[in-house]
């Protein structure tokens, strides 16, 4: 018998599924909105989730992200009346086990459930076969969703990071992770959670820089129905959803002063108050934060509170840039190629010496994330033998001239209208600013004299990768 959570705003369908699956030996609990479903999933153990793609408060992709953050091993099957192949493919890539169209056919849903439960049982067996030191084999890492796909490397700095993670993980100390964008701060946070006593509870990651200033308090602390226009349901915030586990707040320096004060209260009293509520709710959460800003400079400028900083700064780990640990580039390259071979179903034996030489001489402004993406892209273009210089992007082969050549080509291109000219100029300015600041979004926004939200929107509209 499996315990199944069914999330759908169609009361009749929920009742039908509960009766049908119950007759087939399964226990079913129902939720009629995304937030209520996440609340149940956070509080109780389930073997599988059936979820409608279009809910009143969330869509299917939002639910995949949230559910996989809480318990990545539980299979999720999406149900929808809006059959769309592109959505189906994207959902499965994000972690859904399968995708079924409405109207639901009893035999089809039962067969899909059985396959999903069998797959989940296999993953759990692999999880329990984990070596005593807590590490997974390469195959297991990929099957369990890549949560542990970060490798420390062979450098002295890398080994020190591993030691610090293992030292602080068993405690409940708040940790600040420092480092440039792409150095692996979220993976380090997940590793701390993995080695901690809270590893059976949720790990939630939140990018504070991507939170709307108007809705950040609602996302972090929750709200009551009717608290503001558009608050149609009670909503639990990330602090409640992460109860018992770990909450990772990335880009902590982007929180507004108002939300910094609310965060300070959580740190001091272990309580949150939802917007529109008159009562406090106790929370038990281990907090890990990250930033690529200089928080001490922001304190001196008055944009980040000193009392928050000293509450957070119980333990800190600095993650070095890739250019400061070049001796690890061959190790990371091999690791990322192994991942790319698994993901692309290839068997590329390695990279040529000239490629490795180019990698060692490149500055890697996007750090580990950039290296991982480039290795995967090169693997895709390699049809036989090792990865060669022929498939490397121009910025790796000719790093000193690439940006100038790009700008020159755009200047020579015929401008058809004013909108395209402005777009090209903006893209060039943002790319140059990103390189100058080593892809530090806050510094890039300051350099361009725009707010961070505007920068994110521009990057998205202009097709600039958020690396």
Image: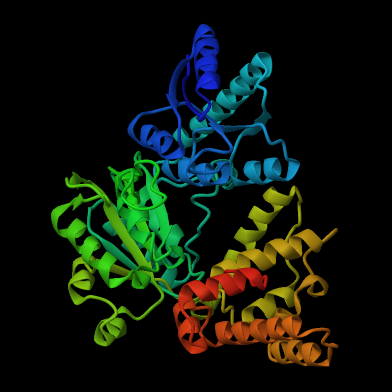
Residue 436: x and y in percent read 55, 88
Residue 321: x and y in percent read 48, 76
**Left or right, residue 196 beside residue 147:** left
Task: Decide which of 379, 32 is in the foreground and name it.
Answer: 32
Q: Is residue 229 above or below residue 249?
A: above
Q: At 69% across and 61% down in the image, what residue appears?
A: 376
Residue 22: x and y in percent read 49, 11
Task: Decide which of 392, 278 is in the foreground and name it.
Answer: 278
Residue 407: x and y in percent read 73, 90
Q: Which quarter of the rendered picture does the C terminus lie within?
A: bottom right
Number of numbered discs: 0
**Left or right, residue 349 beside residue 145:** right
Q: Is residue 329 visible?
A: no
Q: At 40% across and 33% down in the image, what residue appears?
A: 41
Task: Decide which of 327, 416 is in the foreground and name it.
Answer: 416
Residue lying at the far top of the rendered structure: 23
Q: At 78% across and 87% down in the image, what residue appears?
A: 410
Q: Quadrant of residue 217?
A: bottom left
């Amino acid at each position: 018998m499996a315990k199944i959570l069914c999330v759908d705003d169609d009361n009749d369908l929920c009742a039908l599924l509960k009766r049908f699956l119950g007759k087939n030996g399964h226990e079913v609990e129902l939720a009629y909105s995304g937030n209520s479903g996440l609340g149940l999933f956070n509080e109780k153990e389930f073997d599988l989730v059936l979820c409608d793609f279009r809910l009143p408060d969330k869509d299917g992709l939002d639910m995949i992200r949230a559910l996989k953050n809480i318990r990545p091993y539980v299979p999720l099957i999406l149900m929808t009346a809006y059959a769309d192949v592109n959505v189906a493919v994207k959902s499965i890539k994000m972690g859904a086990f399968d995708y079924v169209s409405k109207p639901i056919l009893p035999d089809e849903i039962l067969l899909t459930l059985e396959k999903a439960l069998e797959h989940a049982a296999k993953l759990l067996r692999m999880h329990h076969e984990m070596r005593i030191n807590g590490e997974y084999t390469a195959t297991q890492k990929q099957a369990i969703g890549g949560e542990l796909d970060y490798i420390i490397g062979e450098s002295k700095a890398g080994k020190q990071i591993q030691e610090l993670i293992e030292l602080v993980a068993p405690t409940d100390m708040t940790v600040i992770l420092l480092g440039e964008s792409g150095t692996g701060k979220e993976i380090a946070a997940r590793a701390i959670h993995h080695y901690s006593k809270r590893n059976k509870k949720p790990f939630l990651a939140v990018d504070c820089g991507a939170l709307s200033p108007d809705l950040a308090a609602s996302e972090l602390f929750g709200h009551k129905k009717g608290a503001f226009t558009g608050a149609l349901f009670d909503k639990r915030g990330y602090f409640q959803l992460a109860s018992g586990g770990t909450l990772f707040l990335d880009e902590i320096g982007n929180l507004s002063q108002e939300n910094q004060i609310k965060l300070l209260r959580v740190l001091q009293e272990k309580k949150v108050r939802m917007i529109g509520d008159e009562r406090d709710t106790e929370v038990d959460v281990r907090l890990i934060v990250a930033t690529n800003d200089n928080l001490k400079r922001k304190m001196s400028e008055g944009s980040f509170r000193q009392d928050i900083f000293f509450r957070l700064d119980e333990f800190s780990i600095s993650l070095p840039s890739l250019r400061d640990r070049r001796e690890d580039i061959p190790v990371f390259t091999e690791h990322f190629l192994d991942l790319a071979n698994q993901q692309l179903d290839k068997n590329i034996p390695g990279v040529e010496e000239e490629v490795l030489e180019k990698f060692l001489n490149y500055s890697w402004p996007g750090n580990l994330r950039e290296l991982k993406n480039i290795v995967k892209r090169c693997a895709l273009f390699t049809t036989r033998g090792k990865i060669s210089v022929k498939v490397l992007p121009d910025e790796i082969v000719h790093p000193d001239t690439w940006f100038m050549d790009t700008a020159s080509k755009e200047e020579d291109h015929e401008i058809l209208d004013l909108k395209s000219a402005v777009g090209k100029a903006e893209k060039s300015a943002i790319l140059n600013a990103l390189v100058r600041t080593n892809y530090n979004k806050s510094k890039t926004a300051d350099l361009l004299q725009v707010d961070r939200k505007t920068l994110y929107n521009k990057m998205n509209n202009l097709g600039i990768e958020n690396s």
